[in-house]
Structures are given as structure tokens and as C-alpha cells.
Amino acid sequence: MRIDIITVVPDLLKSPFEASILKRAIDKKIVEVHLHNLRDYTDKSYNQVDDYQFGGGAGMVLMIEPIDKCISALKKERKYDEVIYMTPDGATLNQKTANSLSLLDNIIILCGHYKGVDQRVRDLFITKEISIGDYVLSGGELGAAVLCDTIIRLIPGVLNNETSALTDTFQDNLLAPPVYTRPADYKGHLVPEILVSGNFPKIEKWREDQAYERTQKLRPDLLDY
Ligand code: ADE
């Protein structure tokens, strides 16, 4: 999979891809992530990429021309499955969206900044708009990092133990069951006995029950459909 991210602050997006699971996925060549600085696509003085909004009002707006130039240059090289715009008024990201995006070959992610982008960018180039939650970030970059993490960890070969993504919270609309590791007795606080019983069918049943109970208690909304 190839992910091209368009941003005015590429520095904000470097470190998530330089450590841990995302770095390993890139090193293993399972995924390529390319950062594009929007300022490299403007002819204006001072590398200007934003301007005041027509009609007045506070806040700058990213202009269409550099975004058009950048997206067009990328599209000349290959076909893209989705051109995603990170925005608080997009569809809220969930595991189902992450699962379907993880199956694609090439995607572009455009990060908004300031008051966002000229509406014509959204009308002409964007195929999907995603929010990471009902709160406002300073820009789409941190949202893009979250989106990339959720997608990349699902690609086969990225996690060491592939079943571990399948048993994640949300994969069956259920929260994950509690987990424990050594020591079995920590200052008198014991691990549930069933987990050290060696009875694997019973352990499996216990985990399913726990997942269901946890979901009912903490996120009953997930059981509604
Ligand atoms: N840009 C600003 N706020 C955002 C959010 N909540 N999700 C995605 N992109 C954003």
C-alpha cells in the first residue's frame, strides 16, 4: 500500500512513522508513506498557500491552486483509490472504515489547516472526508497519523501475530476481554483462576463472556446493531 500525505507541516507527521509498528511496516516494505509539503507547490512569494476568505471572517483558508498542483502531480504517476480529506465535519472514523481502507493500494490524505480548504477542493478532488472525533484539532495532521495507524496495523504481515488484530477491541463490535501477565499473584491480587487452568475451551468461553459483559457495561451502544 502507498499513502501520500499532503500537509503544510510535514514535521508534525514525521515521528509517528519513525518508531514501533509503523516503522517496521515501512522497513518491511509493506507500506510506503510519502509526505508532501504543500508549500513546494506554490509559485507565490513567501511560499504562500493560504489566503483570507471571501465575504470576510476570521481565519485563513488553504488555496485551491497548490492543492490542485500537488494532487495532479501524484495522479499523473498512479491511480488512487481514495483522496481523503481530514476534517472535523467528516464521517467519524471507526474500525469498519479502517478495515476497508486497509484493503486499498494507493490513497492520498489531505490535511486541512487554519479554517480548512477552499470548498472547491472538496467538491472537485476529495472522495472521502474523515473526522477522528467531535473535537477540533489545529490541523488534520494528527488525525492523519491516527488514520494511518489504524489502517497500517491491519495490513497482513504488519503485526507479528496476525490474530492479534483480529482479536482487537471493536473487531466484532465487542470490546476486548481483560488480559493479564506474570506474576499470577501481585501483592495478593490474583489473576482469574480460569486463565491458569490450562483448559483452553473454557478460557475461550470465559473471554467471550467477559468481552460481552464489558461491552454491555461500558459501551452498550455497540450492541445495538
Ligand atoms: N482537523 C481538525 N479537527 C479534526 C478532526 N477532529 N478530525 C480530523 N481532522 C481534523
Image (cartoon, rainbow, N blue to C red):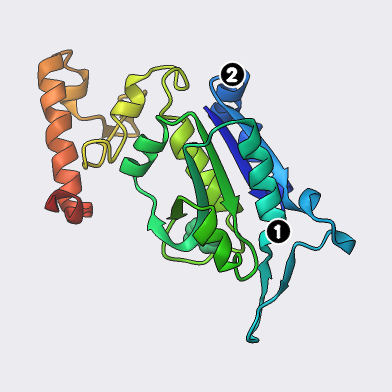
Instruction: State the mark number for residue 125.
Output: none
Of tags 2 and 1, the one toward the viewer is 1
Instruction: State the mark number for residue 29.
Output: 2
Q: Are marks 2 and 1 in contact (CB under 8 Å)?
A: no
Q: Circle 2 sits in a helix, a strand or a loop, which is it?
A: loop
Taking 203 as reference, is 186 left or right? right
Residue 98 visible, this orientation: yes
Q: Looking at the picture, does residue 216 appear above or below residue 198?
A: below
Residue 54 is drawn in which quadrant? bottom right
**Residue located farthest toward the bottom when viewing the structure as drawn:** 56
Residue 208 is drawn in which quadrant? top left
Query: x%, y% of residue 146?
Result: 50, 45
Q: Looking at the picture, does residue 53 appear above or below residue 177?
A: below
Q: State the residue at coordinates (13%, 14%).
A: 199
**Residue located farthest toward the top when viewing the structure as drawn:** 198
Q: State the residue at coordinates (32%, 21%).
A: 163
- Label 2 Cα crowd, 10 Å radius (few <14 / some 14-19 / many 20+): few
The residue under label 1 is 65
Q: CA distance from mark 2 to mark 1?
A: 32 Å
Q: State the residue at coordinates (47%, 66%).
A: 135
Nearest to N terminus: mark 2 or mark 1: 2
Residue 13 visible, this orientation: no
Q: State the residue at coordinates (19%, 47%).
A: 215
Q: Identify which residue, 1 or 154, lies in the foreground.
A: 1
Query: x%, y% of residue 221?
Result: 19, 56
Q: Identify which residue, 198 or 27, lies in the foreground.
A: 27
Report the amino acid beneath label 2. Lys
Report the amino acid beneath label 1. Glu
Q: Looking at the picture, does residue 23 appear above or below residue 219?
A: above
